Image (cartoon, rainbow, N blue to C red):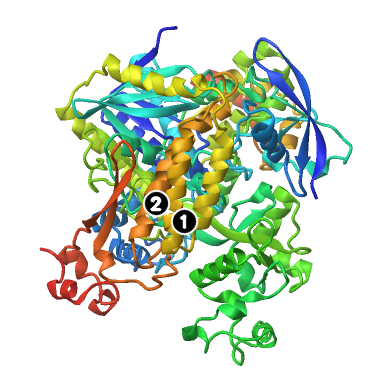
Amino acid sequence: MTQLERHSYDVLVIGAGGAGLRAAVEAREAGLRVAIICKSLFGKAHTVMAEGGAAASMGNVNENDNWMVHFRDTMRGGKFLNHYRMAELHAKEAPDRIWELEVWGALFDRTKEGKISQRNFGGHEYPRLAHVGDRTGLELIRTMQQRIVALQQQDGRDHGDMESHIKVFAELTITEILKEAGKVSGAYGYWRETGAEVLFEAPAVIIATGGVGKTFKITSNSWEGTGDGHALALKAGANLVDMEFLQFHPTGMVWPPSVRGILVTESVRGEGGILTNAAGERFMFKYIPDVFKKMYADNEAEADRWYLDQDNNRRPPELLPRDEVARAINTEVKAGRGTEHGGVFLDVSKRLPAEVIKKRLPSMWHQFYELAGVDITKEPMEVGPTCHYVMGGVEVEPDNAAAVGVPGLFAAGEVAGGMHGSNRLGGNSLTDLLVFGRRAGMGAAEYLKHNGKNPVSDAAIKAAEARIAAPFDRQGGENSYSLHAELQEITHNLVGIIRTQSELEDAITKIADIRKRSANVAVSGGRKFNPGFHLAFDLDNMLLVAESAAKSAFLRKESRGGHTRDDFPGMDNKWRQVNHISSFDGQQVQVCEQALPVLPKELFDLFDVHELEKYMTPEEIAKGGSN
Amino acid sequence: MARKLNLRIWRGDSTNGALQDVQVDVNEGEVVLDVIHRVQATQMGDLAVRWNCKAGKCGSCSMEINGKPRLACMTQVASYGEDETITVTPLRAFPVIKDLVTDVSFNYKKAMEIPAYAHPADVAPGDARMEQIDVERSQEFRKCIECFLCQDTCHVIRDHEENKKSFAGPRFFIRIAELDMHPLDTLKNRKRTAQEEHGLGMCNITKCCTEVCPEHIRITDNAIIPMKERVVDIKYDPARWLGSKIRKRDGIV
């Protein structure tokens, strides 16, 4: 046995997306030595995929914008299930975080006055999203990456070693967070390249691992979104909050595989795209709820006339609200009328001339043509719900991003819960990364003022080693690819965009069964860059995420934001006061209720009381917030 | 629908390796990365390949397909003939780690050698004012997804390991150009260091890098040539030469 590779740092940051890098910068600027772990190469994190922009009330385009307006929008978007303090900090600090990027070299698009341009986005009252064309996420990650390099160059000048204070460990997976005497002591993992194991001793660990999309069959997330941080935190004794809230988009591509999961914007329907099932039936007419009957056409002739004369005709039912469209697609597919790949057809090709489609939907046309050879001017798209973002995540203290219950552990970005409540507004995730990434770095620095090194014991190392060795030692067990596919099928069908009691019950049983079988996963081949081996560990994480999501969804008997129950279609103000807390007892995920923190009076007073009546019980309104 | 594709995959590591033939199902509309994943899931569980976004935005799945540097997620199987065998090999300019995965750390080392953006001390956060037309020049280069295909194809280093020490490569020429054209950057002499320390002069503008760029960045025309021209202008301008001798100033700013 070769000697175990050991590293010792003040702070270990797991994840090198926007939140992880911002946390690392902050910790380094506090004088600490920081290790950054990326599962892939430096600069490839899923943050690059963010297109729309970063929401911050700088007021460059409309000077009426300010943090209070942004706060209100965020709370409304989250249906008031947000942790108010996170939404408040986010709204207040987002502008500074954007301006700081500019000091580090970012080049946002400009207004006529030369300020950072801001664009409109769903749910934001004013133009608020700082952007760079449709590649804002790339600009953010590259700026952070270059800021890290700038600090390393500084360290090179000051200490003669560019990596003296920040070192990036690329293509390394963390399998365990280690604790001694109830506090974080470090983490254990392996190099993806060689399979060789690594021990990091660090009294503060910041989790910034992003999302969980790969738990589901159809997702816009990359392979990295396997819920690693969610699972690492659970196993280390932290809690997850509100894991039932997942953002699904009703129309993601389900076929061909080269574009599976990619979102098809709602404007395709707005431009005349129609939804049909495998039998060619334009099914949306069957799904117009009574309350919408006055506004939506119940026959094709009228629906088609609407595009030419909107005053004298009712709207086509394809333009019903998102959740209605999702429910209709879900029902058609589950009734066996879907396509062979589990979707329905969305066709704009028979509705508009090719040139008009290319002009009105240029990026859609281009993207599918280039990535999949699908020409949306000639053929229908196959679409279905796709998993995009998880609102639930590690329960943290808003001000310092400290994970509740685990001294020395912090979490920021998509992996942390609370900020977005039951539904995230577009544009809020990029500034979430920056605001809470920085706060996690500050939190870790503050923690280390009172907590020194916490050496890792040999027993902890042995246990972590044994866990990595296990799948290689097993013979003839199941293959991790097929178990993963099975899990994705279950979550997609039973814990997906529309949920019901019986299906969630079924899901919980089936997920438990896969978890049992996953204990026998065997890995073929060697340790060197072996994706089968990597997936065996990722699978374990996704199983915990799935269990937590399914159990939380089972318990929440209402529909709100990213959680839609067919059997409880309405929002229930009693449920607004409830967070679902997941914890792990070593055997299974336990979910219990916890009271949502009460909005303080000064934030309560930012709203019109009549608006709050839609979300709060009369008793809450009477109290008028806490003091 | 599905047909069989003859795929030839390079398998091996830094010590040895060889091309292996496999037959794999391919569906309409699939890209090369899809079939590689299918091979991985059904025939070679330990086949190593890098990828992330699968949408042409992260630049991870760089490899050589029938000898051309390409992103596997942006290369449609249908762009090759039905009977054609598709050969996938790792990037040639970098050392192989395993199968299709290469050690691209050269690029991260070079990134650390390019002096960072230097913000003017008197422009406070939020006070920066720049015209859209002025930021657009640098924005073109900031589209770079760091797939390193330009580095792979560049003949200065592709077959000349010895040049790597003194040559940063096209990716970092656009990084220098981006900073040089940044309306607020205060660091002087970026062009001169491009020439003297990062090997700009070794580029003989064959434009291979521009051809393989998946972001269609005009690396040669918009970054390398303008920098070369300025370097030459300044170096051979007799008045400037004289001025620099008399006032002992740096000739290039």
What chain does mark 1 sit on?
A: A
Q: Position of residue A159 (x, y in %)?
A: 34, 15
Farthest residue toward the bottom? Answer: A312
- Disc 2 element: helix
User: A518 and A132: which one is in front?
Assistant: A518
- At horizontal 37% and vertical 73% (from top left) the residue drawn is A570
Q: Amino acid at mark 2?
A: Ala
- At horizontal 40% and vertical 55% (from top left) the residue drawn is A428
Can residue A220 be seen from the camera position used here? no
What chain does mark 2 sit on?
A: A
Tag 2 and tag 1 share a subunit: yes
Q: Which residue is identified by label 1? A: A495
Contact check, label 2 and label 1, Cβ < 8 Å: yes
Q: Which residue is identified by label 2? A: A549
For residue A459, which quarter of the picture?
top left
Q: Position of residue A278 (x, y in %)?
A: 71, 66
Farthest residue toward the left? Answer: A627
- Disc 1 element: loop
Other-residue count near label 2 (Cα within 10 Å), few / some / many at <14 / 14–19 / ≥20: many
User: A459 and B135: which one is in front?
Assistant: A459
A52 in relation to A159, above or below: below
The answer to whether A135 appears left or right of A27 in the picture is: right
- At horizontal 78% and vertical 71% (from top left) the residue drawn is A353
User: B18 and A608: which one is in front?
Assistant: B18
The answer to whether B188 appears left or right of A318 in the picture is: left
Q: Amino acid at mark 1?
A: Val
Can residue B70 be seen from the camera position used here? yes
Q: Position of residue A421 (x, y in %)?
A: 33, 58
Q: Position of residue A238 (x, y in %)?
A: 27, 40
